[in-house]
Amino acid sequence: MDTTSRLLMLLEVVEQGSFIKAAEVRNIDRSVISKQLSRLEEQLGVRLLNRTTRSFSLTAAGAEMVKKAAELRELLGETVRMAENYHLEPQGVLKITSSTLFGKRYLQPVINDFQMRFPQVEVELRLDDRVIDIVSEGFDLAFRIGEPKDSSLIARKIARNRLLILATPTFITNYGMPKTIEDLTQLPAASYASTSFKVEGVRYYDKNGEAKEQKLNSIFRANDAEVLLMKTLSGSAFFVAPAFVLDNEVKEGRLVPLLTDVRLMEYGAIYAVYPHRDLPVRTRLFFDAVREYLGKDIPIWERAIPNFEQLYTG
Amino acid sequence: MDTTSRLLMLLEVVEQGSFIKAAEVRNIDRSVISKQLSRLEEQLGVRLLNRTTRSFSLTAAGAEMVKKAAELRELLGETVRMAENYHLEPQGVLKITSSTLFGKRYLQPVINDFQMRFPQVEVELRLDDRVIDIVSEGFDLAFRIGEPKDSSLIARKIARNRLLILATPTFITNYGMPKTIEDLTQLPAASYASTSFKVEGVRYYDKNGEAKEQKLNSIFRANDAEVLLMKTLSGSAFFVAPAFVLDNEVKEGRLVPLLTDVRLMEYGAIYAVYPHRDLPVRTRLFFDAVREYLGKDIPIWERAIPNFEQLYTG
DNA sequence: CCTATTGATGCCATTTTGGCACTAATCAAA
DNA sequence: TTTGATTAGTGCCAAAATGGCATCAATAGG
């Protein structure tokens, strides 16, 4: 890491407001930020931040450096964009793996677009809900849901993964509307289960902000979210579903969110995972296309759920 | 190394005209340049250089990138200079070691200046002609003559080290003016000799450009260049001297360069050596001050030798 | 006044870097 | 055309830098 990268890191820290947030955005440890900024200060011979143990403020010098860092980022961006004008037509094979539903629903349209623009890129998409060793199998890019584990890979969060508790109006008529989260134990649930992994409860924060888990009474388990959704639509179970499995079911009233005043915990996030620090062009172009398609703050799937920003916030 | 550094490397390569020269300027191996530029190309997805095995030319994209790299260097320089405005008054101890004569003659004035400007910096100068382990003895900066050996240290060439063959007019009258370099064996020489190291001959290129060495007939040996110079001035020996030992002896006619049509080999160079890649501020400021004092292409001591650029060039 | 949060730090595993030796190819001179 | 010197590329290895984890210390915020 060089002076420029450190300056950009400083900029990000200031924009995010804390070391931790900046570290999360970059998917690195906060200690890295701490160490690199210390080195930057040593290198420039200037104290950039006034720190307390829990926060910081910019010094005058720091503020100037942040301005310059912004200019640097701009110039560097220009440079890269300029290089892009000279890009060879990207070509070769792009090997991607993803969980089945996410791939079908959200990667497919991006791939279509991408191949229209870059016809010489072949795409190989492996849909598989098991975790795959992307290095040994030679994948360029993987999309995973939950928390990234293998730290030898680079993981970048590309979207949050909020949950909903869903049932059909018929279901509510038949079983009654649950009033508290504990009521869920009395109701039949459909839940995800694969060989390696089972959803057995729903995590939430109680009114004191403490993390809790409510067990579920699963009468139907499957390792395919679409199947679970179909089961739910049949009216014979409710479903604790990640928002991304939904299409227009809520907007059209076919499914109703239950217990929307409970603050549900997010189920990890959607991560893009790749093996090397520097992506080759075709991979980066595709990666950028996916991010653009999904959206920056609010993922595309959440926009189909009316008022979702206010739901499940406690 | 990040993209910016690689762009700056590209810029330097283009400015220097070859990988090798750029590598020499930075005191790194050419392979590093080759590898880093390849990575830059991969990263930008653009071929920047058309290569043959022995040379290269810029592609259109490469030319654009070089322009941008120049802008980046400018902006980065501005940023650093801006940081310097906020520098804390440098303070602390600066431990320097150097060969005796070089230190006395060329570091002393720089140190005086430096301490006028930064009174809070204490300087410890150790003059010693033996090679010192700068890491274990805690030196910040060392100045060495010859070729850098210890590759765990960073060495930067700060001046070339050209040689002359000198004698007094009296000496020439008494012994006759040598016509060929072989004549030197007939004449009494003063030469450098320490416990670890002896000068026994003078290296040069013959008219075919082949490296040769002419043995000397040393009648006086010492490990102190000033003593050798005094001996020479007494008229009883000639002296194969590095240019930096001279003051105004040549300009004032007290010493005369002999055999100026022989192409003498440079005796290594003057190197600054330091232990870490990133210098702390006080060290870097001092280092810069030394470089400014010595001069960029032609070292300060060569300017006192009339017409030296044309002498000993074969 | 307490406690969870945040930044700093030391240690360790992993990755990256830089150097060396060797290869390959070309430029230039005979 | 041949030959030799020069210069870039490559694989391998040792050394350095990086990133992550666990721990510490101190405060911001209730």
Image (cartoon, coloured by chain):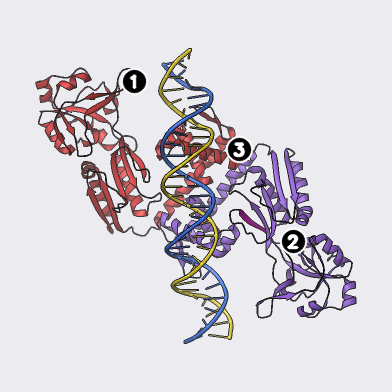
Chain colours: A red, B purple, C yellow, D blue
Q: Chain of mark 3?
A: A
Mark nearest the camera among 3 and 2 is 2
- Residue B249 lies, with reference to residue B88, above or below; the image says below
Q: Amino acid at mark 1?
A: Gly
- Residue B265 lies, with reference to residue A162, above or below; the image says below
**Real-space Cα separation, disc 1 to disc 2, in angstroms:** 77 Å
- Residue B273 lies, with reference to residue A41, above or below; the image says below
**Real-space Cα separation, disc 1 to disc 3, in angstroms:** 41 Å
Query: Which of the labelled discs sits on residue A209, or is there none?
Result: 1
**Real-space Cα separation, disc 3 to disc 2, in angstroms:** 45 Å
- Characterize the local packing of mark 2: few (<14), some (14-19) or many (20 or more) Cα atoms within 10 angstroms: few
Does any portion of residue A11 appear in the rendered image? no
Are dots 1 and 2 on a single chain?
Answer: no
Tell me the magenta residue range. Answer: B149-159
Residue picked out by circle 2: B195
Q: Position of residue A259 (x, y in %)?
A: 22, 22
Mark nearest the camera among 1 and 2 is 2
Residue picked out by circle 3: A46
